[in-house]
Image (cartoon, rainbow, N blue to C red):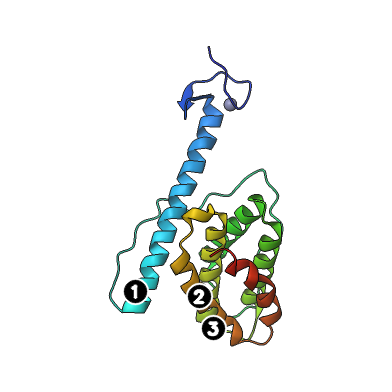
């Protein structure tokens, strides 16, 4: 019986010509599912941007399941919604943001991850933005974080620049978030 290429268990599957045990095959499938979900979210996001810019309704694609919790790794700088924040912050967006900021950190861009987390938390907490502007800013931050994780040649440069400008507009309308925004802005610009 062949041995799993990732651990000492007996292999029962093969993926990318690598023998895998049941547990490792499951983890591999989880990664594929997560990548597919991320692509669907990106597609929906772009459709939403088109809809905003053109006023023409665009289709949305179904994300098959909620983003799974990444187990085993430590999540630092977790973005939270405190009880004092008034209004309907999109909690699904916060969960998604936590996952992508974590992915930015795991991709080796710790400084960017920390600054994104700090700015995101400040967006959630600020009294200077209405809830619609907060949700929009959080959506933009999640998109930019997801782009940061992509290989450079796969990044969506023109969309990225549009999103950066939209985020800039929201940030410069505040006074209290400017310092955090200016700390992260050059890192985000260098992505595109
Ligand atoms: Zn294994």
Q: Return the mark for residue 136.
A: 2
Quote the CA–CA distance across marks 1 and 2: 14 Å
Residue 138 in view in this figure: yes
Give the CA separation, mark 2 to mark 3.
11 Å
Q: Quadrant of ligand 1?
A: top right
Instruction: Choose the circle earlier in sequence order: 1 or 2.
Output: 1
Mark 3–mark 1 Cα distance, whole angstroms, equals 19 Å
Residue nearer the viewer, 2 or 148: 148
Q: Which labelled disc corresponds to residue 169?
A: 3
Q: Residue at x 57, y 63 (%)?
A: 191
Lower position in the chain sequence, tag 3 or tag 1 = 1
Q: Which residue is label 1 attached to?
A: 51
Please state if 106 lies on the left or on the right of 91 as rendered.
Answer: right
Q: In which image quadrant can residue 176 be found?
A: bottom right
Q: Quadrant of residue 9?
A: top right
Residue 188's quadrant in the figure?
Answer: bottom right
């Amino acid at each position: 019986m062949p041995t799993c290429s990732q651990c000492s268990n007996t292999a029962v599957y093969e993926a990318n010509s690598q023998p895998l045990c049941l547990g490792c095959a499951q983890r591999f499938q989880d990664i594929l599912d997560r990548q597919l979900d991320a692509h669907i979210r990106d597609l929906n996001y772009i459709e939403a941007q088109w809809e905003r810019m053109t006023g023409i309704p665009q289709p949305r694609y179904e994300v098959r399941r909620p983003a799974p919790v990444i187990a085993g790794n430590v999540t630092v700088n977790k973005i939270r919604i405190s009880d004092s924040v008034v209004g309907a912050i999109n909690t699904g967006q916060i969960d998604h943001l936590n996952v992508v900021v974590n992915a930015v950190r795991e991709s080796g861009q710790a400084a960017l991850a920390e600054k994104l987390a700090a700015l995101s938390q400040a967006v959630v907490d600020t009294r200077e933005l209405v809830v619609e502007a907060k949700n929009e800013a959080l959506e933009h931050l999640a998109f930019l974080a997801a782009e940061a994780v992509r290989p450079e040649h796969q990044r969506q440069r023109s969309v990225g620049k549009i999103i950066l400008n939209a985020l800039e507009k929201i940030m410069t309308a505040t006074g209290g978030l400017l310092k955090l925004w200016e700390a992260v802005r050059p890192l985000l610009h260098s992505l595109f």
